[in-house]
Image (tube, rainbow, N blue to C red):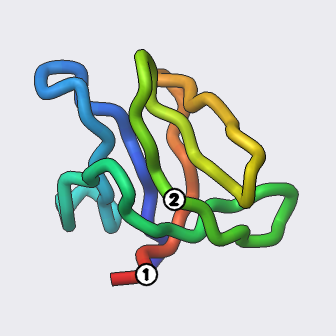
Amino acid sequence: MMQTMKFHKETRRWRLYEGTRLLYPLHCGDPILIEVDDAFCRVSLELDTEWYVKLGETKFWLHRKTVYNVRSLF
């Protein structure tokens, strides 16, 4: 089953789900594979003033209302 990453507004954190089941509340520095154009890229989840993912030296801000397809690396 596909895993998804959704923002949880009460805790202001991203969470990892499998279907509707909560698997893991994500933390700064957690490695994940995130889907980009039908391919999965290894990134780390980071927090500055907003949450973002880091791919090498490139940073991508996450949108709180977007559900991302991911695969956990832990």
Of residue 21 and residue 33, the one placed in the foreground of this image is 33
**Residue type of the residue flagged with mark 2:** Ser
**Residue type of the residue flagged with mark 1:** Leu
Foreground: disc 2 or disc 1: 2
- Identify the residue shown where x is 53% and y is 64%: 70
Q: As displayed, is residue 69 above or below residue 53?
A: below
Q: Identify the element where label 2 is drawn.
A: strand
Mark 2 and 1 residues: CB-CB less than 8 Å, in contact? no
Which residue bears the numbered disc 2?
A: 44
Q: As displayed, is residue 48 above or below residue 16?
A: above
Quarter of the rendering occupied by the N terminus: bottom left
Of residue 54 and residue 37, the one placed in the foreground of this image is 54
For marks 2 and 1, the one nearer the N-term is 2
Quarter of the rendering occupied by the C terminus: bottom left
- Identify the residue shown where x is 26% and y is 52%: 27
Q: As displayed, is residue 48 above or below residue 27?
A: above
Expressed as whole percent of the image width and height from the top left, the position of residue 44 reads 51, 59
Q: Is residue 72 shown left or right of residue 40? A: left
Expressed as whole percent of the image width and height from the top left, the position of residue 50 reads 44, 21
Determine which quarter of the picture holds residue 7.
top left
Expressed as whole percent of the image width and height from the top left, the position of residue 56 reads 73, 59
- Identify the residue shown where x is 23% and y is 24%: 12
Q: Which mark is residue 52?
A: none
Q: Which mark is residue 73?
A: 1
Count of residue discs: 2
Expressed as whole percent of the image width and height from the top left, the position of residue 32 reads 49, 68
Label 1 neighbour load within 10 Å: few <14, some 14-19, many 20+: few
Determine which quarter of the picture holds residue 3.
bottom left
**Residue occupying the far front of the picture:** 57
Q: Identify the element where label 1 is drawn.
A: loop
